[in-house]
Image (cartoon, grey):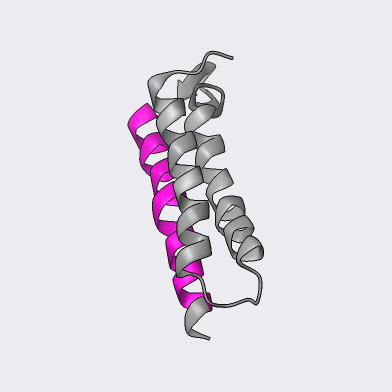
C-alpha cells in the first residue's frame, strides 16, 4: 500500500484529532480515554478516504458496472474525519 499525499494528510488529521480530544475533551477522568475516543471516531473517515477505489463500485445496473463519484466519497470521508470526532468530543464534554 503506497502512502500518498492524501493518505499522509488523513493520518496527520487522525493524530491531530487525538491530541485535540485529549486537550478539549472533559467527559472522562482519563485524557488517554478521550484521545482514544477521538481517534476511534476518526477511523471510519480514514477508511473511506483510503479505500475509496474499492468502495466506489456500487453494483450492476442493466448489466453495466456503476461507480460512485470519487468526489462524493471524498466528501463523506472528510466529514467523518473532521466533523464527527469534534462534535462528539464537544457534546460529551458538555454533559
Expressed as whole percent of the image width and height from the top left, the position of residue 91 reads 47, 76
Foreground: 59 or 55? 55
| Range drawn in magenta | 68-92
User: For the point 45% across and 24% down, which residue is it?
Assistant: 67
Foreground: 55 or 6? 6
Foreground: 80 or 37? 37
User: For the point 44% across and 18% down, which residue is it?
Assistant: 4
Q: What secondary structure prevails in the magenta region?
A: helix
Quick check: is 81 in the magenta stretch?
yes
Q: Is 26 rendered above or below residue 63? A: below
Expressed as whole percent of the image width and height from the top left, the position of residue 35 reads 58, 58
Identify the residue at the far bottom of this view. Answer: 95
For the image, the number of numbered tags is 0
Q: Is 52 rendered above or below residue 22? A: above
User: For the point 45% across and 27% down, which residue is it?
Assistant: 8
> Which quadrant would the N terminus be assigned to in this image?
top right
Expressed as whole percent of the image width and height from the top left, the position of residue 50 reads 51, 28
Q: Is 5 rendered above or below residue 90? A: above
User: For the point 61% across and 60% down, which residue is it?
Assistant: 37
Amino acid at each position: 500500500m503506497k502512502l500518498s499525499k492524501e493518505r499522509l494528510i488523513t493520518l496527520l488529521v487522525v493524530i491531530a484529532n487525538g491530541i485535540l480530544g485529549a486537550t478539549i475533551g472533559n467527559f472522562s477522568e482519563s485524557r488517554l480515554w478521550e484521545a482514544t475516543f477521538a481517534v476511534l471516531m476518526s477511523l471510519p473517515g480514514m477508511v473511506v478516504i483510503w479505500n475509496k477505489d474499492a468502495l466506489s463500485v456500487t453494483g450492476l445496473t442493466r448489466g453495466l458496472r456503476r461507480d460512485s463519484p470519487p468526489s462524493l466519497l471524498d466528501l463523506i470521508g472528510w466529514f467523518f474525519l473532521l466533523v464527527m470526532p469534534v462534535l462528539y468530543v464537544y457534546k460529551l464534554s458538555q454533559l
